[in-house]
Image: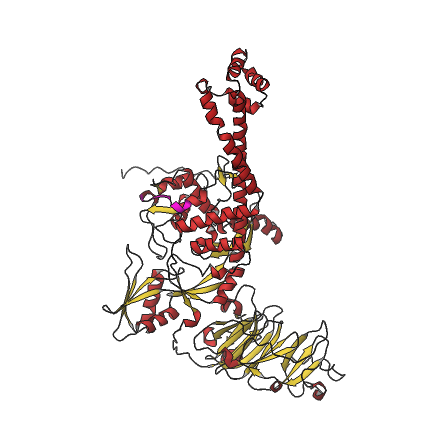
Amino acid sequence: MAGKREKKQPKAPKAKGYIAGAGEIVEQDVGETLRKNFMPYAMSVILSRAIPEIDGFKPSHRKILYTMYKMGLLGPGRKKSATIVGEVMKLNPHGDTTIYDTMVRLSRGYEALLHPFVDSKGNFGKFYSRDMAWAAPRYTEARLDDVSKELFKDIDRDTVDFVDNYDSTMQEPVLLPVGFPTVLVNANTGIAVGMASNICPFNLTEVCKTAIALLRDPQADLFETLQAPDFPGGGLLVFDKAQMERIYETGRGSFKVRSRYAYDKGQNCIDVTQIPPTATIEVIVEKVVELVKQGKLKEIGDIRDESDLEGLKITIDLKRGTDPDKLMAKLYKMTALEDSFACNFNVLIAGAPRVLGVRALLEEWTAFRVECVRRRTHFDLRKKKEKLHLLLGLQAILLDIDKAIRIVRETEEEAEVVPNLMIGFGIDQVQAEYVAEIRLRHLNREYILKRTEETSQLEKDIQELEGILGSKTKVRNIIIAELTEIAKKYGKPRRTMLLYADEVEEAEISEEIPDYPVHLFFTQEGYFKKITPQSLRMSGEQKLKEGDAIARQVESSNAAELLFFSDKAQVYKLRASDFDDTKASVLGDYIPAKAQMDEGERAAAMVVTKDYSGFVLFVFENGKAAKVELSAYQTKTNRRKLLNAYSDKSPLVCALYLPEDREVLMTASSGRMLLFHTGLIASKTTKNTQGVQAMNLKKGQRVLSCAPFAEGDLQNPGRYRKKLPALGALPDGEDTGGEQLSM
């Protein structure tokens, strides 16, 4: 009512609580804080979450598959995904959503694995679609795929160790006794703290054949049985043998995968049916639409996603007169229709992360499988010996069944039955217990004879099992036979076809690059700056990393090409236009990251050119010098990386770009200096030439530097001019080691 006063709510009492340590600043050593707080988290992510183990699984994968195995889902029957997720939470209490997402990625419906471990029913999405969401777990069903039988075949025969789950209410396997190298058959990706793992899949038949070949000959050529990675989405792998060899041996490296397409002449359109494993339909379509709007792809009328139950399909309508092959070459260059796959075969071995090549991984898996077979054999041997022992007790009472019955009948106390049987027949307690437990109806000669007939067969089996344990060859033969059977049973033809790198023609895409003067700076630590003259005039001191210094400064233009030579005998080609204009007050771009150099690789020298004239003088620690025409690094295609850029027989001291022949001064660790004209060295077009001996060195000596010589650098230059090869000369009093020289 309007006339009535509203009741006032009682005020909450003021809290007078106290929080210990609130507002206090506690000083703590950073290293100690990291050890106590950060390191346990980092180790947990590495060991228990992100990095797969030698059986090819992360803990989350293993918990799901083992739970489904214990639920009896190896048979034809399926269960609701929600039920499976609920059971998995007994091993993995981190939430039902993450469990279901992981199960989806293991499923046949998701199509992300060459050999999926989960046979799914319902909408499980597609790995090649970013926006296609999978259905909720209450709407889908699943069981273990048939290939999963090879994961659990021997798990109940003491092949692997078991540990308690998080609340010690049940046990789970530490590893799965996989019958084939799953670590290489199915893709596996994980990001840990400070490290990552990215393992590409290989064809199961090829992997099994390679494992067999290595079991027979540890030095076997991998390429005879293992062609290249094989992806579930197919595509065309651009095969470079040198790159693939590096991946096989080190577990690191990258290769390119192209989409596959077909041209429909009647509809004048391109149908893309297979895309790289790192791309999605949405990313490709969005990029093409963007390029069309920018006017860079005028040949395309429309692009749409026509994927359906039959599989992936991206349709590109062409304008009249468009060459489909030339258009696809441009699309490969400008979109994710061609993408790189960076390999990082990081696997947990005995609880420690290790990056291993294909050969080393298969060797580790073989050692693991040998241990599984030996443990299985020990288990079978123990069981058969136990059974034989019991049957020998039965044989003893076979001689006088009536005596056995009389002993049991005349024994007054139950506890004395077993001791009396032991005394009466000369058998041990285990045998006596077994005899005493026989039912009365089985105390007949026929039953006992049938049971004891197994004795001779058991003795043969025991002898055979002991022979296996005593022979490495027999263990290897068992593994070979199992791998052969698995390859025959589950093997499938390759999905990813090979396209050899020397047959690939990359499209030349003409881009209008604004041309204006710039100053280019390259530092000893590998940082790069591009600064306009106006900005440089207004700038103050160059900002550099502590201990760093400017190694090369060049006045050039924005249209210039840059060649960065690394300390791994590789060269990376970029353009000045690839870098943003910057200021002297910033550190600049870090070249190893910008150029996507390999891990641990460092940028050693920079060459700036427009027409690839002149040459590069490579000087090595062993006193040799090689003169390579810069045109040797010019390519018709826009290749960003060239291997074998110079000789790697000796560490590189410097790479000097010289437009024309001139004098250079070489300095050795002994203090000797050698002045010579580069015209004395023959120019080569072979990039990795070892060059000629320029400076003779004594044992333990090496070349320290080499720099262009200018008049006035030395008081008496004639003293250091020698006929090559030469020891050089020690500096006199007037030439104090050429301190004014710089690289």
Q: Residue at x 42, y 43 (%)?
A: 149
Please provide percent x and percent y for residue 420: 57, 16
Please provide percent x and percent y for residue 482: 46, 47
Residue 252 makes an appearance in the image:
no
> Where 345 falls versus 8 (above or below)?
below
Q: Is residue 68 left or right of residue 723?
A: left
Q: Residue furthest right?
A: 733
Q: Is residue 42 left or right of residue 666?
A: left
Q: Is residue 417 left or right of residue 674?
A: left
Please provide percent x and percent y for residue 113: 40, 53
Front one among 327 and 705? 327
The mark tally for this picture is 0
Please provide percent x and percent y for residue 196: 50, 56
Front one among 305 and 676? 676
Q: Residue furthest left?
A: 266
> Where 502 falls versus 274 (above or below)?
below
User: Quadrant where the C terminus lies?
Assistant: bottom right
Q: Quadrant of residue 274?
A: bottom left
Identify the colour scheme used.
Answer: secondary structure
Q: Residue 390 magenta-drawn? A: no
Front one among 220 and 346? 220
Q: Residue 142 magenta-drawn? A: yes
Q: Which residues are magenta?
A: 139-148
Residue 373 makes an appearance in the image:
yes
User: Quadrant where the N terminus lies?
Assistant: top left
